[in-house]
Image: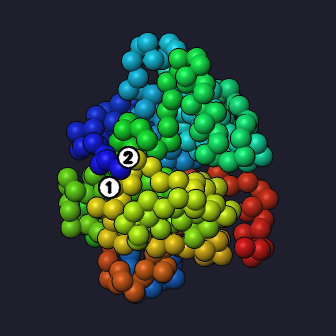
Amino acid sequence: MGKIKLNFEDVLAARERLAPYLTTTPLRNYPSLDRVIGHDIQAFIKLENHLPTNSFKYRNGLSAVTALSTSEKTNGIVAATLGNHGQGVALAGSLLGVHTKICVPVGNNPDKNEAIRNFGGTLIEKGKDYDEAVEVAKNLMRDHGMTMIHSVNNLNVIAGAATITLEMIGQRPDLEALVLCVGGGTHAVGAIAVVQAINPRIKIYGVQAEGAPANHDAWHAKKPLPGSKTDTFADGVKTRNIYEMTYQPLQDGLTDFITVSDSEIAEAIRLYLQHTHNLVEGAGAIGLAGLLKLSNVLQNKKVGLVLTGSNIDQITIKKVINNEF
């Protein structure tokens, strides 16, 4: 797989395009949570759940849609999602007057489906999982001349995600490490590009759900591995594939890559609720779950985490609170 062509100028350009539509999200430290993490670690948490769609993927969609040509906007856009990417693209399309179709698998989270509709997207439910929904979106692109905004394999999507780390380093120049959730990899790859340009001494650790370990397994094997499973309640990371634009940068840029169980993710959600009073979805808690496992490695460090989103449904949050994972 080829290397991504994202450079720091792409990230700066994305920041300029995003500026009229969003403000810098908070980066906060919670001493009581630090005490739970232990090892004299200070964790600084980027609250991306404060964005309009309650997820960092608003940045991704907005970065991609604002970069479209006039003709691409006229022909409309299509995306595949399990929720957060689709919400970001739908809202970006609404803000810019672009007709948007969002493909989700049958049985997708009903709360996220409703949110996509509320943000102005035309919802199409077809396929058994995310990867089949991608194929549905590709067919619409081919048949109707629409522009597809892939949730991972899109340079401007990744540049949008990179603006998170750009903000974090501006807010805390003394950060020494980042522990980041990895699904498809846009967030981590964006962070890698920014860190390499601004402060290569910052170490980046990837964390993936052990029930959806495609990128993790490929990273350790140093080669793509087919047929990975997707068995986790953290639907924001449920992909069984690796991706052309993120595979090699993850190989080159991560210091280490670990997995966490569903029970560890659920515990991280409970800790966020208790110590920060922020609601968090499964994918959004994976970074904290990873830091708890890496705490002895990161002793005495100032560590950046990203609460990537809070779009968790009532049934799942009840299970988390009742320790059913």
Q: Which residue is mark 2?
A: 245
Quarter-of-image position of residue 18 = top left
The image quadrant where one finds the C terminus is bottom right
The residue positioned 54% from the left and 48% from the top of the image is 55
The residue positioned 29% from the left and 43% from the top of the image is 6
Task: Name the amino acid, label 1.
Answer: Pro
Asked whether the beta carbons under mark 2 and mark 1 sit within 8 Å of each other, the answer is: yes
Residue at numbered disc 1: 249
Q: Is residue 309 left or right of residue 63?
A: right
| Percent of width and height locating residue 127 | 71, 41
Residue at point 36% right, 83% down?
A: 297
The answer, for residue 297, to whether it is visible in the render is yes
Above or below, 312 relative to 267: above
Picture layout, residue 311 above or below residue 94:
below
Q: CA distance from mark 2 to mark 1?
A: 8 Å
Q: Nearer the viewer, residue 66 or 243?
A: 243
Q: Quadrant of residue 77?
A: top right
Tag 2: residue type? Met
